[in-house]
Image (cartoon, grey):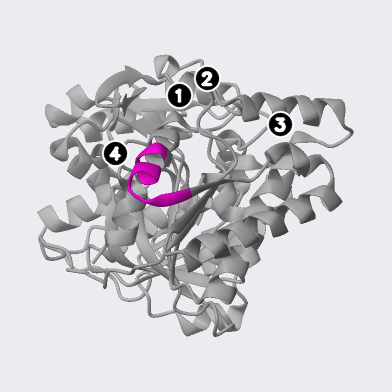
Amino acid sequence: MNSGRVLPEGPLVAFYGDDFTGSSAAMEALAFAGFETILFLSPPTPERLAHFSHYRGIGIASVARSRSPEWMDKHLPAAFEQLASTGAPIVHYKVCSTFDSAPHVGSIGRAAEIGQRRFRGWTPLVVSDLGMGRFQAFGNLFAHADGVGYRLDRHPTMSAHPVTPMHEADLGRHLAAQTRLPVGLVDFVTMKRGQADALLARELERGMAIVSLDLLDLETLREAGRLIWERGAAQQFVLGSQGVEQALIAYWRASGLVPSTGVGAQCARVERVAAVSGSVSPITAAQIRHARAQGFEPIVLEAQLAIDTDLLAVEVQRVIDLGRQALERGRNPLIFTATGPDDPRVVAFREAVRASNVEITTANDRLGAALGDVLDALVRQCGLRRVVISGGDTSGHATTRLGIDALTAIAPISPGVPLCRAHSLDPAIDGLEIALKGGQTGHVDFFVTVRDQH
């Protein structure tokens, strides 16, 4: 329980992201509130971790969202142990604000079970992100699409997600298919009536292992932060989106523990950028169309070739050549595998995978790596200093191919998507500015904003 009037020294939040773009969103929340934060793109060595032990936020990005429960059993215990070793009072398993998960892939329930075995006490669940249009009421999650709010099981994208479709907006019910841990709720009405502590106590007396916290506005954001910070264990394990960090910061500010304003950040405009996208989201499709109209050079990487590594290697070289030629002509290449879920290339890719003996996860991994290889070549051959990767799973694979060790946030671009600085032992990559965008994030002019950011 953290009831002191002064924040402790050292790390405050240690988080493990189940995808790369979401991890950068958690980093953004802390960094621009004035808490120096480092995001490692793979588990750091003890020596590397010790080098950043004075940072207030320490994160590790992963691809857990696209992995099986068995993968989690193998990897998460060591990751949670490493986060616990930082001494941070908050250990956060970071998930997407659209709760992308299923019993067989990206299981948040399995992550909760592993966390419960390592850490004491109840597990708060905070998923909303007000800035990104994610709201929770009476345990049900809602999300905006094109300015319109939808219950998540009726959301035009999430209800038809190709990997983790949401058929249930009640997060407790959704989790019940992934874990036997009982899920309770502190609803927003109780919060606003000042009765959250009493309800939380009743939920814990009933044996609720996970307690979902409604979040609709600044008042409930602060209250969620208070419940986590003051009603948690000495080292509290938390599930949720970057809303966890936002809630804590809102409470710390309201309590006078930190300044009420964040830190300013800016960077110079660049003339040349390159972007790669493995997202099939309609939001990303609209962003690609807008970028094309604003002078980006569209280049397609044929996804169905991922079933054959030799053919894919030839395709990667073809795309690299086209990207380099575009840059030489003063154009910014935007390399993508599809423009939204209705693109015929999506069907062609799935049919090619079904007709082969290649698993869909293997094909997707190859595509992410291929896009990373394209970007890596363009950075090295053309001296680029700013790039974009679109797609949560794509970002994980592509950044690995670039040889990036860690990221720090340098400027906000769009809610949940900061412009970051890459850290690497490779001088060609060290200092590279990079934005990692999830499929559901960013305004329509996102790619153009990254180019013009200053």
Q: CA distance from mark 2 to mark 1?
A: 5 Å
292 is within the stretch colored magenta: yes
Distance from label 2 to label 4 (Cα)? 20 Å
Residue at (63% x, 28% y) in the render: 346
Front tag of 3 and 2: 3
Numbered range of the magenta stretch: 289-297
Q: Is residue 33 magenta?
A: no
State the residue position of label 4: 132
Judging from the image, what secondary structure is the residue with disc 1 in? loop
Disc 3 and disc 4: Cα gap in Å? Answer: 30 Å
Q: Quadrant of the N terminus?
A: bottom left
Mark earlier in primary sequence (1, 4): 4
- Callout 3: SS: helix
Q: Residue at x 24, y 38 (%)?
A: 130
**Circles 3 and 2: CB distance less than 8 Å?**
no
**Is residue 345 left or right of 108 when viewed as pictured?**
right
Which residue is denoted by mark 3 in the rendering? 349
Residue 306 coordinates in the image, percent (x, y):
76, 43
Q: Amino acid at mark 1?
A: Thr
C-alpha span from label 1 to label 3: 19 Å
2 and 4 marks in contact (CB < 8 Å): no
Cα separation, mark 3 vs mark 2, equals: 17 Å
Residue identified by numbered label 2: 160
Reading the image, the residue beneath label 1 is 157
Residue 347 placement: quadrant: top right
Residue 177 rendering spot, x and y as whole percentages: 60, 22
Q: Which mark is residue 281?
A: none
At mark 2, the secondary structure is helix
